[in-house]
């Protein structure tokens, strides 16, 4: 008994154990699962999680990128046509973003999978999975349509609304008027005089959105039966598999940290003011 | 107070705010009505009651008003209880007991067959159980012997599960389940067509013979329909109305408490940090940055699995985790500006205490930002509660909208096409979320004129 206690390090004080756990978590030594097994048959929490991580990254990465570029594009177009029909539609629909992605997911599944029966209910690929790589990729793509649509639907209206407002505020600045007076083309003005100064703000708000999307992953993947990290967490809850629950939460925290870190770098790229030492070189 | 009055006056000019306010007030009235009509304890017993309470209701059927949109009308439930005088009852004295005849008559004018039929018996006797024979009379004059049986206390006869009846039906009517055979129009299947029900007055005769002077028999006929009530039922025959109604006060309470709790505490902490500056401010800043990294939902999931799934514990955890949120930075930025204004200096000069400055001079200045923020936060907490419920971590005893969605998804409502089960709670969630979001967005525009210009 004593030996076992010593082996597991339970004889040491709580603070020391916390730091030991921190070290283990940092090196991804997350222990062994109690009930869950990875697809390859391993009981290591690390392997179970690493196996599911790529699908999550694939889905959320695609959806977030699409969301970002689509939103910026639509917001720019709408800021040009302030007060038009579509502008009003987006403004009116912006409160619908209060609902999270899975909520729209249910509606989309209901319409496209259950009612029209043109898209799958969920899952990663067809059963059985296609043999050739091309068909496999196409099948995954088909299964990604609905979840991606759900993510975009849940966030696009609010981001378009708030970004278009930013664009409008910035396009009434004096230097934009000056640029217009100089006879620069609309496209150049948009790119150099409106988009450039608003990008840091936009990226911040986008970062917050990405974080909230990440946080919603467990339920989102459960609704779409998407075999990613979120659903692993959900399954672990069902099986009461404590090491997997703790491990997934730790990984989620890492993902958030990495997202914010990447966005900080991006921030420095688009906003020269925050670059350290940037002022001295000039 | 003046702020409130001015705001209300201005809100009239925004249609979306008016719509939002109407939705919110309707929801509030609805919630109050629910709490009075179905008290907390009653709601819980009803929702967790099981078959004893809900045996009269059909399983997973859509609400009755869907018939309005159907060409083929689905049958509603028929419940006739002889104890409530819904049967023609006559008694005839016999040597040791009596003969009781109960006639259950109902008009059937639908285009589909009922789900099932059940006959419940409520006999009172000392030793010898009464004997009952049951006969079915169809509108065209045909009749069918259903069963002859001695009835014990709590006895029930389920038409669909009786083998003798099934054999008799096969011999006399054809190879159909009881619920179809008893209502079948023979003309419809003569040429191999689709079976359709015969419309008209049906009658079930229950003749009970008792063998003791004091003995008695009452019975209840239930013809389970394919639609029910204004909300339909779930897989445990429960009326969805109860959960839909109770979802409203729960959602409002959770959303409001969480939003108010978070914003007010966040505001105070931001003000304290800015006012005292130095180490206090630094600590608050760092805690916020760390807390922003923590994924809220997975942590709530951990609390739900390891500690308690009670909605109030989750509510508390949500508030604590959201206090050090992104809004602390926004508030801090505003407080930093306010702190430099001359009137704060004046207050300090005449000796106002720190607490007085924070609560009377700093905090009132932030209300224009705070109020829209608070209102827009409410729907996100309402949906958070629903999300947790859909993950199976909802409050174990209270019925909520999220739990309805979870029940429906877990029982394959989407695969089986039971759309009403998913759509009803989702629609209510959506309406609630939209109501608060629309009001919040408009308030934001009113309080932050920079947004209004464009």
Image (cartoon, coloured by chain):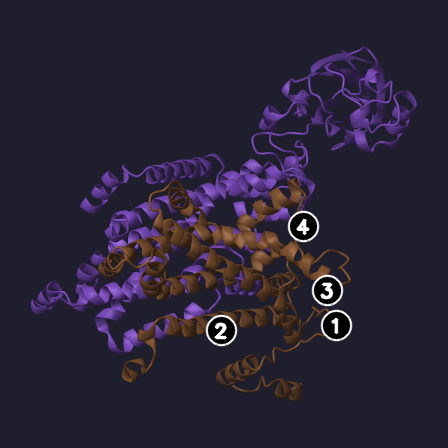
**Chain A painted colour:** brown
In the structure shown, which secondary structural element does the residue marked by tag 2 occupy? helix
Residue B177, x across and y down, in percent: 82, 29
Could you tell me which residue is drawn at 24 percent across and 63 percent down?
B334
Could you tell me which residue is drawn at 38 percent across and 62 percent down?
A202
Q: Which of the 4 image quadrants contains residue B223?
A: top right
Q: Which residue extends farthest front?
A: A183
Depth check, mark 4 against mark 3: the one in front is 3
Earlier residue among tags 2 and 4: 4
Q: Which residue is mark 4?
A: A120
Q: Which residue is mark 1?
A: A41
C-alpha span from label 2 to label 4: 32 Å
Q: Chain of mark 4?
A: A
Query: Please, is residue A139 above or below residue A22 in the view?
Result: above
Numbered marks: total? 4
C-alpha span from label 4 to label 3: 19 Å
Q: Is residue B353 left or right of residue A66?
A: left
- Crowd rating for badge 2 (residues with CA inside 10 Å; few <14, some 14–19, many 20+): few
Task: Point out the image quarter for the C terminus of chain A.
Answer: bottom left
């Amino acid at each position: 008994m004593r030996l076992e206690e010593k082996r597991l390090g339970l004889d040491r004080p709580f603070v020391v154990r916390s730091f030991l756990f921190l070290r283990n978590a940092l090196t991804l030594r997350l222990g062994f699962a109690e009930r869950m097994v990875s697809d390859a048959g391993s009981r290591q929490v690390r392997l179970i999680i690493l196996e599911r991580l790529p699908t999550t990254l694939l889905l959320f990465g695609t959806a977030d990128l699409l969301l970002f570029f689509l939103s910026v594009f639509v917001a720019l177009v709408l800021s040009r046509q302030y007060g038009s029909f579509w502008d009003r539609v987006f403004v009116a629909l912006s409160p619908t973003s209060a609902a999270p992605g899975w909520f729209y997911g249910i509606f989309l599944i209901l319409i496209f999978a259950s009612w029209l029966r043109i898209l799958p209910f969920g899952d990663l690929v067809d059963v059985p999975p296609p043999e050739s790589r091309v068909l496999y990729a196409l099948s995954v793509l088909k299964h990604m349509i609905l979840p991606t649509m759900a993510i975009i639907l849940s966030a696009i209206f609010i981001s378009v609304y708030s970004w278009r407002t930013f664009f409008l505020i910035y396009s009434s600045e004096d230097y934009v008027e000056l640029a217009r007076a100089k006879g620069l083309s609309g496209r150049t003005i948009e790119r150099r005089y409106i988009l450039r100064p608003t990008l840091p703000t936009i990226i911040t708000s986008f970062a917050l959105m990405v974080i909230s999307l990440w946080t919603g992953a467990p339920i989102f993947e459960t609704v779409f039966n998407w075999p990613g990290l979120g659903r692993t967490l959900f399954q672990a809850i069902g099986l009461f598999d404590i090491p997997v629950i703790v491990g997934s939460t730790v990984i989620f925290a890492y993902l958030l940290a990495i997202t914010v870190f990447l966005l900080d770098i991006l921030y420095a790229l688009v906003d020269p003011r925050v670059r350290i030492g940037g002022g001295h070189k000039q | 107070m003046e702020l409130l009055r001015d705001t209300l006056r201005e809100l009239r000019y925004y249609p979306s705010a008016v719509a939002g306010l109407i939705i919110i007030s309707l929801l509030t009235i609805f919630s109050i009505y629910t709490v009075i009509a179905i008290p907390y304890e009653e709601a819980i017993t009803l929702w967790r009651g099981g078959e004893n309470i809900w045996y009269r209701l059909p399983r997973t059927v859509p609400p009755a008003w869907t018939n309005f949109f159907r060409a083929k009308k689905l049958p509603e439930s028929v419940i006739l209880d002889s104890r409530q005088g819904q049967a023609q009852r006559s008694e005839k004295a016999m040597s040791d007991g009596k003969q009781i005849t109960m006639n259950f008559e109902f008009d059937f004018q639908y285009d589909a067959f009922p789900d099932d039929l059940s006959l419940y018996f409520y006999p009172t006797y000392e030793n010898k159980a009464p004997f009952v024979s049951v006969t079915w009379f169809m509108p065209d004059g045909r009749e069918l012997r259903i069963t002859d049986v001695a009835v014990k206390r709590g006895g029930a006869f389920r038409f669909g599960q009786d083998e003798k009846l099934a054999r008799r039906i096969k011999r006399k009517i054809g190879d159909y389940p009881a619920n179809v055979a008893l209502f079948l129009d023979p003309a419809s299947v003569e040429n191999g067509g689709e079976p359709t029900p015969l419309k008209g007055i049906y009658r079930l005769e229950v003749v009970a013979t008792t063998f003791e002077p004091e003995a008695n028999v009452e019975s209840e006929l239930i013809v389970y329909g394919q639609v029910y009530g204004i909300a339909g039922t779930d897989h445990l025959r429960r009326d969805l109305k109860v959960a839909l109604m109770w979802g409203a006060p729960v959602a409002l309470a959770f959303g409001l408490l969480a939003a108010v709790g978070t914003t007010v505490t966040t505001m105070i902490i931001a003000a304290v940090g800015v006012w005292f500056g130095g180490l206090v401010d630094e600590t608050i800043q760092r805690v916020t940055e760390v807390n922003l990294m923590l994924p809220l939902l997975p942590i709530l999931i951990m609390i739900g699995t390891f500690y308690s799934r009670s909605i109030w514990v989750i509510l508390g955890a949500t508030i604590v985790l959201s206090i050090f949120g992104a809004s602390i930075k926004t508030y801090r930025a505003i407080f930093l500006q306010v702190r430099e204004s001359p009137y704060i200096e004046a207050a300090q000069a005449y000796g106002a205490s720190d607490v007085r400055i924070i609560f009377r001079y700093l905090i009132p200045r932030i209300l224009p930002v705070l109020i829209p923020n608070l209102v827009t936060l409410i729907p996100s907490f309402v949906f958070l509660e629903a999300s947790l419920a859909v993950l199976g971590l909802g409050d174990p005893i209270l019925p909520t909208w999220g739990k309805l969605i979870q029940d429906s998804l877990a029982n394959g409502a989407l695969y089986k096409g039971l759309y009403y089960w998913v759509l009803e709670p989702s629609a209510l969630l959506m309406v609630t979320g939209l109501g608060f979001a629309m009001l919040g967005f408009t308030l934001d525009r009113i309080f932050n004129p920079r947004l209004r210009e464009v």
